[in-house]
């Protein structure tokens, strides 16, 4: 994410963009130092770990949401919780091209070339600069969660899989 921020702020000279990075963990202090080293610290807010209410408040201020997870074997086969959260909130998404990410988000997301942070940045700017497309993508994701991916739609599939594997008891 920080590499994409450098591309946007320093490379494309966009000072109208701010990045909110939520989460804690052992890399937080290193990421904060890196933002300062890269001279983008004024454009990035690191919240650390926050409550669900604070996370929701922050996401509700976002114009575009990002999944900056790099492509690897695990990420290619996993839908991150944040993708579903973004879609439930009607937010457009940018992420790297991954099989499961595309399956889940479909037209709610733009897909950057695998691990190409410059392309990720360009996709972010494309959505920031096209509010109508962003709105349409966010609405698509929201509808998809409600009509296809919510628990009421997924629970019967999971129960059928258990029944197939273990038989009825």
Image: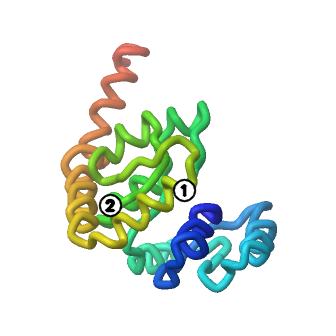
Q: Residue at x 35, y 42 (%)?
A: 104
Please give the residue where the numbered disc 2 appears in the rendered image.
Answer: 88
Q: Quadrant of residue 166?
A: top left
Mark 2 in CB contact with mark 1 (< 8 angstroms): no
Quadrant in which the N terminus appears = bottom right
Q: Position of residue 115 (x, y in %)?
A: 58, 45
Asked if residue 22 shows in the view, the reply is no
Q: Which mark is residue 101?
A: none
- Tell me the SS state at disc 2: helix
What is the C-alpha distance between the residues marked 2 and 1? 27 Å
Q: Residue at x 56, y 48 (%)?
A: 116
| Number of numbered discs overlaid on the protein picture | 2
The reply, left or right, for residue 23 in relation to residue 167 is: right
- In the image, residue 117 sits, relative to residue 59, either above or below, namely above
Asked if residue 57 shows in the view, the reply is yes
Q: Residues within 10 Å of mark 1 (few under 14, many from 20)?
A: some
The reply, left or right, for residue 115 in relation to residue 99 is: right
Q: Residue at x 47, y 78 (%)?
A: 58
Q: Which numbered disc, 2 or 1, marks the residue closer to the eye?
A: 1
Q: Earlier in the sequence, mark 2 or mark 1?
A: 2
Q: Position of residue 4 (x, y in %)?
A: 57, 62
Q: Residue at x 39, y 61 (%)?
A: 86
Please give the residue where the numbered disc 1 appears in the rendered image.
Answer: 118
The reply, left or right, for residue 25 in relation to residue 68 is: right
- Tell me the SS state at disc 1: helix
Q: Position of residue 155 (x, y in %)?
A: 31, 38
Colour scheme:
rainbow
Q: Residues within 10 Å of mark 2 (few under 14, many from 20)?
A: many
From the viewer's side, name the closer residue of 51 and 39: 39
From the viewer's side, name the closer residue of 67 and 87: 67
Quadrant in which the C terminus appears = top left
């Amino acid at each position: 994410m920080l590499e994409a921020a450098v591309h946007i702020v320093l490379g494309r000279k966009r000072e109208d963009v701010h990045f909110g990075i939520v989460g804690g963990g052992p890399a937080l202090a290193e990421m904060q130092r890196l933002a300062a080293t890269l001279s983008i610290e004024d454009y990035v807010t690191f919240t650390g770990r926050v409550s669900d209410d604070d996370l929701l408040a922050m996401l509700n201020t976002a114009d575009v949401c990002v999944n900056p997870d790099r492509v690897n074997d695990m990420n290619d086969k996993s839908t991150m919780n944040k993708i579903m959260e973004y879609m439930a909130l009607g937010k457009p998404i940018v992420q790297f091209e991954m099989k499961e990410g595309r399956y889940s988000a479909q037209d709610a997301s733009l897909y950057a070339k695998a691990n190409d942070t410059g392309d990720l940045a360009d996709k972010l700017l494309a959505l920031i600069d096209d509010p109508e497309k962003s709105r349409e993508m966010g609405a698509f994701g929201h509808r998809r969660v409600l009509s296809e991916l919510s628990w009421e739609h997924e629970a019967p599939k999971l129960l059928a899989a258990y029944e197939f594997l273990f038989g009825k008891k």
